[in-house]
Image (spheres, rainbow, N blue to C red):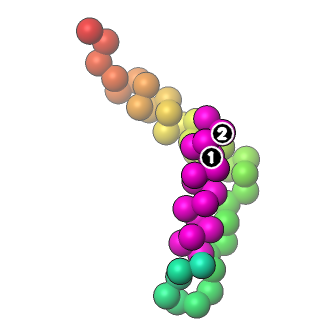
Amino acid sequence: MPEILMAWDAKVHFLQMTNPNGSPTPTPSKEAAAKEARMGFRVAAMSRKMD
């Protein structure tokens, strides 16, 4: 889990630095990003087929 959050932060930083519009987009708070990641994992787990 920490590796995923670190990769997410790095991707956001990269996108901010390479934004062609010149102004970085506002970053979500760590709590909001963690909540979004948890919800994504829940959806992925619930959509998995149990064989």
Q: Which residue is mark 2?
A: 2
**Which residue is situated farthest in the top direction here?**
51
Locate residue 39 relative to residue 26 in the image: left or right: left
Magenta segment, which residues? Answer: 1-16
Q: Are marks 1 and 2 in contact (CB under 8 Å)?
A: yes
| Residue 15, image quadrant | bottom right
Quarter the C terminus occupies: top left
Res. 35 visible in picture: no
Quarter the N terminus occupies: top right
Dot 2 alpha-carbon crowd within 10 angstroms: few under 14, some 14 to 19, many 20 or more = few
The image shows residue 3 at horizontal and vertical percentages of 61, 42
Q: Which residue is mark 1?
A: 5
Residue in the picture at 52% in, 89% down: 21
Image position of 49 with respect to 35: above or below: above
Looking at this view, is 49 or 14 the one in front?
14
Q: CA distance from mark 1 to mark 2?
A: 5 Å
The image shows residue 46 at horizontal and vertical percentages of 41, 24
